[in-house]
Image (cartoon, rainbow, N blue to C red):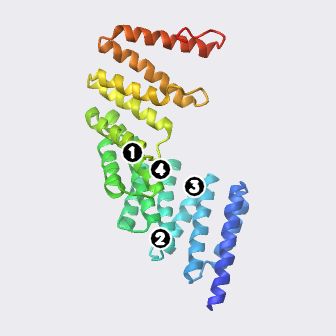
Amino acid sequence: MHGSDATNDQQLAEELVARGEELRELHRLEEAIGCLDGVLAQFGAATDPGVREQVAGAMLVKGEILDDLGRHHEALVTYEEVLGRFGRAREPAVRELVATALVNKGLTLGDDLGRPQAELDVYEELLTWFGDALEDGVREQVAKGLLYTETTLTQLDLPEDALGACDELLARFGDAQDPSMRELVAAALIGKAEILDAGLGRPLEAIVVYDEILTRSSAAEPHPREQIAKTLVAKAGALEQLERYAEAVETYDDLLARFGDTTESEPELSVLVRVARIGKSVALIKTGRHAESLALSHQLLGRLSATLNPRIEDPSS
């Protein structure tokens, strides 16, 4: 194929894939599939690397749309076709598409078809194929595979194995600087802490991880406000398990200092603030600070009354 012909084919294929994605955004899913099928019909046998990338992309998006439509078995066939056609590709962009197809296949098997062991097998295949990859986009898919492995193993009540998946993700990617990778690392830390605390009953180790999450959050890691508050509540609970009640009070105070002025416009965070106030009240009793606990309880009642009926004046104000 002449260079100009290949360039023209790549441009046309790109336009068709972009049109398919646009139709998907408009929820015109059957039309989007038709557009992507046009790419496959016209350019499916292409050998030019740029055109091959568009064909692989068209197949991947088609699989995702089939999943959107609930046609999961057809989606699996499409992901398998990506793997069969392009699994040995060396072009970085195509390798990323293949890795994404593996992750999508795993999610379809586990989340949509209820086959968790088959899902885990796919993530193992992902590690075999791409565990040593250097391309950022491929590495991100590997990290996702490890994170989803942890989630699935936790659902299967295999906390030690789930912890291993978290540790592997953190060992491979814990120092990553890319924002999307750092978000996955943050999720792995949260998962690890929850496994240690709730899954394995190892609160002392969980506290170390909670502290790492909080340290990273203060360094502008991608932790939403709600997640920081959840981490502080969980850390306080772990401290209470260890009967370190004074430290638990300090942890609740940290949460209240950060988020105590939260309004009902952030309902989830507001609930966590209330939990922290109640937890602090109980922990104060455990430390013998009964007067402070009683005062805080009165404040809680006043806030509750004001929430239920804004016309009732808060006695703590």
Q: Is residue 299 above or below residue 8?
A: above
What amino acid does circle 1 point to?
Arg
Q: Is residue 244 left or right of residue 4?
A: left
| Badge number at residue 72 | 3
In the figure, residue 132 lies in which quadrant?
A: bottom left
Task: Report which residue position mark 1 lands on.
Answer: 216
What amino acid does circle 4 point to?
Gly
Q: Earlier in the sequence, mark 2 or mark 1?
A: 2
The mark lying in front, picked from 4 and 2, is 2
Task: Report which residue position mark 2 lands on.
Answer: 95
Instruction: Please tell me which residue is depicted at 66% across the width and 81% down the height of the picture.
Output: 9
Q: Earlier in the sequence, mark 3 or mark 4?
A: 3
The local secondary structure at tag 4 comes to helix
Q: How crowded is mark 4: few (under 14 residues within 10 Å), some or many (20 or more)?
A: some
Instruction: Please tell me which residue is depicted at 34% across the width and 18% down the height of the picture.
Output: 283
Pointers 1 and 4 in contact (C-beta within 8 Å): no
> Does residue 218 show up?
yes
Task: Report which residue position mark 4 lands on.
Answer: 110
Residue 107, image x, y percentages: 49, 53
Count the marks: 4
The local secondary structure at tag 1 comes to helix
Instruction: Please tell me which residue is depicted at 44% across the width and 55% down the height of the picture.
Output: 181
What amino acid does circle 3 point to?
His
Residue 218, image x, y percentages: 41, 42
Name the image quarter holding the C terminus: top right
Q: In this view, does 40 lie above or below 149?
A: below
